[in-house]
């Protein structure tokens, strides 16, 4: 197949999806377009042509695609465009997320040719109760780059996208039911907060504001914890019993799962 460009696409509040998508692209000897970052609200719509290989990465929330990521993916359309699909999960389980992503991008005009489930530091990971802390790490990034290199080699064996087999990935349909949102949100430690408002700037759903103190709207917050992980003063924290639960039950390292044209 003659591919002219690579198009990275991701929703990545804490940068884990972005890192993996970027490394997959770097493993390919093809021109890489400027990334389409769906992390923040944008009115831009874009169609990715069929001579481009899209790499689409999103995080999972409770075994499904993060709802905000799925919503923003609707702005991206394909034209029978080949796509590598990637989900990032926090070392527990990605369950139906990769299957959901495969089916979703097909409806948007893409032809999934490969997929991967990679591990990223869990949103609820803390210093006291770390879960997949620091991931994706060097080993994960090496796997991602090699994955990209192998997919290009596989695609080179075909002359037309119509010859490609249907991508088979793990997951169940109907998908796991999404759980209702809980009202808990990250909070601010006033003594540490300098009101620099960086958390307001990076919130992917624009739900943080400065009143007497920095606060989040519990009806809108998606608990990505970008504000917690990015605060330069450690002034944002998210206290949840799930941090300890995840640490105790999902502490052992999991490795990426890859699905390609040979599987």
Image: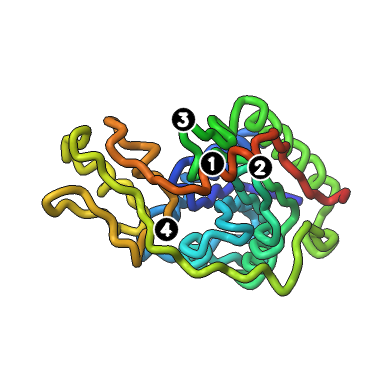
Give whichever of 134, 157 is nearer the camera: 134
Name which of mark 2 and mark 1 comes first in the sequence: 1
Q: Which mark is residue 111?
A: none
Residue 240 left/right relative to 189: right
Distance between the alpha carbons at the discs numbered 3 and 2 = 16 Å
Residue 241, position as x, y percentages in the image? 49, 48
List the residue tagged with mark 4: 222
Residues under labels 3 and 4: Cα distance?
Answer: 21 Å
Residue at x 31% of width, y 33% of height: 234
* Camera-nearest label, 1 or 4: 1
Give the label, 1 or 3, closer to the camera. 1
Name the residue tied to disc 2.
249
Marks 3 and 4: CB-CB under 8 Å?
A: no
Q: Separation of disc 1 and disc 3 at Cα?
A: 11 Å
Instruction: State how many labels appear.
Output: 4
Q: Earlier in the sequence, mark 1 or mark 4?
A: 4
Does dot 1 land on a helix, a strand or a loop?
A: helix
Res 244 label: 1
Q: Is residue 172 above or below residue 24?
A: below
SS type, badge 3: loop
């Amino acid at each position: 197949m003659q591919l002219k460009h690579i198009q990275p696409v991701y929703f990545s509040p804490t940068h884990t999806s972005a890192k993996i998508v970027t490394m997959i692209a770097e493993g390919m000897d093809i021109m890489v377009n400027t990334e389409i970052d769906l992390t923040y609200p944008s009115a831009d719509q874009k169609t990715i042509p069929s001579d481009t290989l899209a790499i689409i990465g999103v995080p999972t929330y409770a075994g499904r695609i993060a709802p905000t990521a799925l919503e923003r993916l609707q702005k991206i359309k394909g034209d029978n465009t080949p796509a590598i699909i990637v989900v990032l999960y926090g070392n527990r389980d990605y369950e139906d997320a990769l299957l959901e992503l495969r089916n979703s991008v097909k409806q948007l005009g893409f032809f999934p040719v490969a997929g991967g489930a990679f591990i990223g530091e869990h949103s609820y990971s803390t210093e006291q109760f770390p879960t997949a802390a620091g991931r994706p790490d060097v080993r994960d990034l090496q796997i991602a780059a090699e994955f990209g290199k192998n997919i290009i080699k596989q695609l080179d064996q075909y002359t037309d996208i119509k010859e490609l087999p249907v991508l088979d990935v793990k997951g169940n349909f109907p998908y796991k039911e999404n759980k209702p949102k809980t009202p808990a949100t990250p909070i601010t430690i006033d003594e540490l907060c300098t009101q620099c408002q960086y958390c307001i700037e990076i919130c992917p759903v624009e739900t943080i504001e400065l009143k007497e103190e920095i606060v989040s709207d519990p009806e809108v917050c998606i608990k990505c914890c970008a504000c917690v992980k990015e605060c330069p003063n450690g002034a944002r924290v998210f206290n949840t019993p799930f941090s300890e639960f995840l640490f105790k039950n999902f502490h052992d390292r999991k490795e990426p799962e890859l699905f390609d044209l040979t599987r």
